[in-house]
Amino acid sequence: MRSAESTGSTTEARATDASGTEASDTGPHSDWWRNAVIYQVYPRSFADGNGDGTGDLAGVRRRLPYLAALGVDALWFTPWYRSPQADGGYDVADYREIDPAFGTLADAEHLIAEARGLGIRTIVDIVPNHVSDAHEWFREALAAPPGDPARARFWFHDGKGPGGDLIPTDWVSSFGGDTWTRTTGPDGEPGQWYLHLFAPQQPDLNWSHPDVAAEHEAVLRFWYDRGVAGVRIDSASMLAKDPALPDLGQDHEPGLHPHLDRDEVHDVYRRWRKIADSYEEPRLLVGEVWLEDNDRFVRYLREDEMHMAFNFDFMSRPWDAAALADSIRATFAAHAAVAAPPTWVLSNHDVTRPVTRYGREDSSFAFLAKRFGTPTDLDLGARRARAAALLTAALPGVLYVYQGDELGLPEVEDLPEGTRQDPMHFRTNGVDPGRDGCRVPLPWNANGPTFGFNENGAATWLPQPAGWGDRAAASQESDPDSFLHLYREAIRLRRNEPSLRGDAFAWSETAPDVLAFRRGEDVTCVVNFGDAPAALPAHTEVLLASSPLQGDLLPTDTAVWLRA
Ligand code: NOJ
């Protein structure tokens, strides 16, 4: 870690200037984000303002007071652009338009300004690896003959074997299945194949084409100019491909895999960083970088690249003291080499909700391990998810909260047949339950046909479980022991306790099933993963506990913040 004081003074006060984008925490260039709380909005499922069953920007605008009361510093919106929604908006047809289901560009501009007036910045999602097959570039490419320049922005290729009937490479899609789809010529005959590391509706762009680079730089400026504070970069390590299109083969030297984490991808982010830094309040680059090798991971966080990247290593670990301590140590060690802060993530729109995951025998997360019918104990999971919330909120760095985790929503595992939409489910022939279960529209009120997701009760795009009224935001409002109160209080303390603001962190000696660390001068976080209650260290005050304490004992699966 860097020295204790190096970033401690950067988020002194929350911007409250209602005049909009000029407001800043400690000056125009303050690193407001270094220990920010960033709340992820999945717009389709957050709140429905126009009563069509799909969430939208009007819904978010209406709920901004809720987000301000939660105390978050920024909102990250998963893609809100025009899209056929073949992959929940990660199939972008036009970056400069808002999907009509969500609203208009003017709505987005109002939302950005209104949020900023409440001290909340906005981060938008950029999906550079691929576009939608409805994007005008891809339509042009499909209509053009092989060899035409319009095809050079993508990866069109002849198939192997007689008649070109075999796929050009053996690369495997992140969604399961092949990564190439064959086109049909105007004469109805099979033609070339095109590459898609995800669904066929998401053709991969060719990043060695100058149009591709120029267009994305223009898109960055388009959104930065509209006052967004940063971009989250989708599938950030996948953009560059080996132009020779080799098969996967066995092992690859770092940086030389045919389509993952190739060294030349960093040039893209160096160019983007220059653009981000050219604004008076420098804009952010946040990377979605799934890499097992921490040394390769932090290369994306070098001084002239991204500002931060999601910590999926921590997110994927089981509820286990040694496993989580190991991840925290590894995170600090990896980030020691760069100026970027660590991030702490419990979930997002792609992974099983913590309440469900932590109630399982194997509480780690892995895409390939997701199966229907995995037993879970939701009470146990909820208890652990509350403790995990306090553990992550106590760590130095940036905290991400996925919408609904602050309500303790579980994964919806029993969505009715025919309602699932996620390509991950279909491309594994239904073996993988997919990601719909963490994307179910939020419950706002205790009652009503959609629990306040909309006012007219129009059926939600994914059905909500009966009984979600008890988990609704309004229901939790009146219960001081609710998830919502726990999150709010944790975020409030994180902001107001000087010890929780800087980087200072020191492990404390504990029994093997207990994690404890001190932050700054006087705050200690203790988490008990063991089966038996653990003795609390000496303290003068209990700041916050995830479950009731038993006198001076910390019950199992409980976290506490102490003044010590
Ligand atoms: C990562 C996103 O988080 C996920 O939802 C999406 O399906 C893939 N990238 C492809 O864009």
Image: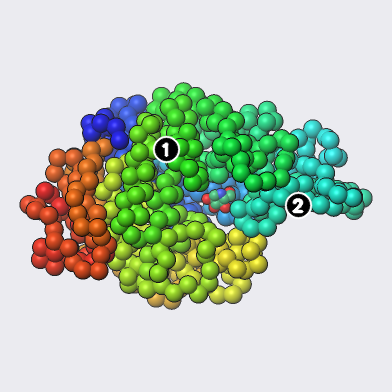
121 above or below 29? below
Q: Position of residue 245 (x, y in %)?
A: 72, 40
The residue that label 2 is drawn on is 181
Residue at position x 78%, y 38% in the image? 151
Residue at position x 45%, y 37% in the image? 295
Q: Quadrant of residue 13?
A: top left
Residue at position x 60%, y 64% in the image? 425
Q: Position of residue 232 (x, y in %)?
A: 48, 41
Number of residue marks: 2
Q: Position of residue 282 (x, y in %)?
A: 41, 28
Q: Residue 89: tell me if it is visible.
A: no
Q: Are marks 2 and 1 in contact (CB under 8 Å)?
A: no
Q: Residue 199: tell me if it is visible.
A: yes
The residue that label 1 is drawn on is 308
Q: Does dot 1 land on a helix, a strand or a loop?
A: strand
326 above or below 499? below
